[in-house]
Amino acid sequence: MSDIIIIGGGPAGLMAAEAASQRGASVCVYEAKPTMARKFLMAGKSGLNITHSEPLDRFLSRYGDDAVRLAPFLRAFPPEAITAWMAGLGIGVKTGSSGMVFPQQWKASPLLRAWLRRLDAAGVQFFPNHFWQGFEGEALVFKHGGENILVKADRAIFACGGGSWPRLGSDGGWRKGFEAAGIKLLPFQPSNGALLVDWSAHFVERFHGAPLKGVRFRVGDVSSRGEAVVTKSGLEGSGIYQMSEALRQKMAAGEQPILEIDLLPDSQMARLEKRLEQAGKKESFSNLLRKAFGLRGAKASLVREAGQARGDLPKGLKRLPLTVAGFADMERAISSVGGVPWEALDDNLMVNARPNVYCVGEMVDWDAPTGGYLLSACLAMGLVAGRAAAK
Ligand SMILES: Cc1cc2nc3c(=O)[nH]c(=O)nc-3n(C[C@H](O)[C@H](O)[C@H](O)COP(=O)(O)OP(=O)(O)OC[C@H]3O[C@@H](n4cnc5c(N)ncnc54)[C@H](O)[C@@H]3O)c2cc1C
């Protein structure tokens, strides 16, 4: 029997394993997949944005209402502690002009390899291909090689991830076991995912795959400058992901979710009005967009797609309204919300109704935009729960 069992070998689980083993606990990590941290590796494919270098208060504000519960963890393992921890693994960082922090090597694999080596050397044991199914009394039931095996430990830390990209392992298969144990869960919803927009056939045919660069997105009071790509079913990209929470709130309130796009964020309204005045009245609409406002291609077509007429200009270019039909499904979302509600957990992330059982990472119901905030919180939660469990 080990002191502590970690269920789920993603970043939150591995950090819990490290923190607990540093405090002298004997630790075993049980993972459903044949290898650890598949989503972490996928996250690194287009650059592992592991944290952000902005001042801590601003950093914490990115977590919205969840900052109240997450702040103690993030203060215990703030961005500079993450980069120091990486340095300890021999991984330098580079910081982009926007403040986003990446490993020097850009991807996740060198970091993961060094991390697993260090855990192994510290005596942490790994049990891949073990899928946790439920509790049986005090024991944990895992499916392994077609058989059910029972495992006992003093404490268990669950780090099974959210519901997005289920093929990488975090498929919500743990939910049944939690619900059977009387732990109430919130349904998963995609976050930081693509938006669905009912494009016209003409627009999709001509512009799917086209980037929208240098624009500003706005939903109510929330706005973000960024980029997106037109897809067959809507829009995706970092600028869009920042709008997830605000859009979800509108949908939950039964309001029509409208995404406003400022196509000319560097131009003041008065300047655009002047340009409109100066433009020849006889210009066709597309010529007017091109000559007076420099808009062509997907951006110009988007103006028509959003139903803006000549009379709506220039306001329609600064606040181009797109009706959002919903979020694309979980399969491709960067993260999810839902899962274990905060009310079910104490300040050390222990399940109130099940002493000695902890939950960390994305399986807990919190949300954050992309920019390094997701991984930062997963690592910080793992650290705090690992230390608490090892006490
Ligand atoms: C394409 C993509 C890009 C991303 N890029 C970034 C980024 O740049 N920056 C950032 O901050 N975040 C990024 N993320 C999000 C980030 O990867 C996740 O938030 C993070 O991996 C969640 O960590 P976790 O440990 O909580 O869960 P996961 O990483 O999902 O790990 C959970 C682990 O638990 C295992 N498991 C699940 N159920 C069971 C079970 N029943 N029994 C045993 N094991 C189980 C899974 O196999 C998995 O290995 C990205 C995500 C995706 C999909």
Image (spheres, rainbow, N blue to C red):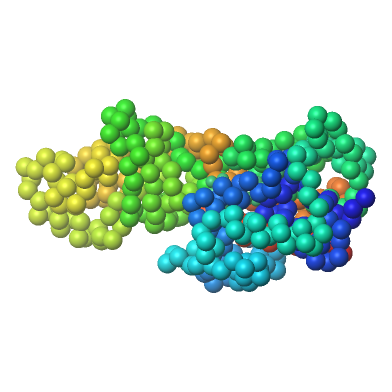
Q: Nearer the viewer, residue 238 or 291?
A: 238
Residue 306 can be seen, yes or no: yes
The relative height of residue 157 versus residue 175 in the rendered view (above or below) is below
The relative height of residue 187 versus residue 124 in the rendered view (above or below) is above
Identified at 28% across, 55% down, the residue is: 264
Judged left or right of residue 82, residue 370 is: left
Seen as rendered, the residue at the extreme top is 201
Q: Position of residue 385 (x, y in %)?
A: 77, 59
Q: Position of residue 19 (x, y in %)?
A: 77, 63
Judged left or right of residue 286, residue 120 is: right
Q: Position of residue 334 (x, y in %)?
A: 55, 46
Q: Nearer the viewer, residue 342 or 229?
A: 229
Identified at 66% across, 61% down, the residue is: 114
Identified at 12% across, 53% down, the residue is: 277
Residue 248 can be seen, yes or no: no
Quarter where residue 145 is shown: top right
The relative height of residue 190 versus residue 55 in the rendered view (above or below) is above
- Give the mark count: 0
Q: Position of residue 305 (x, y in %)?
A: 29, 36
Identified at 82% across, 37% down, the residue is: 142
The quarter of the picture where the C terminus appears is bottom right
Judged left or right of residue 198, residue 142 is: right
Q: Nearer the viewer, residue 275 or 253?
A: 275
The relative height of residue 242 versus residue 270 in the rendered view (above or below) is above
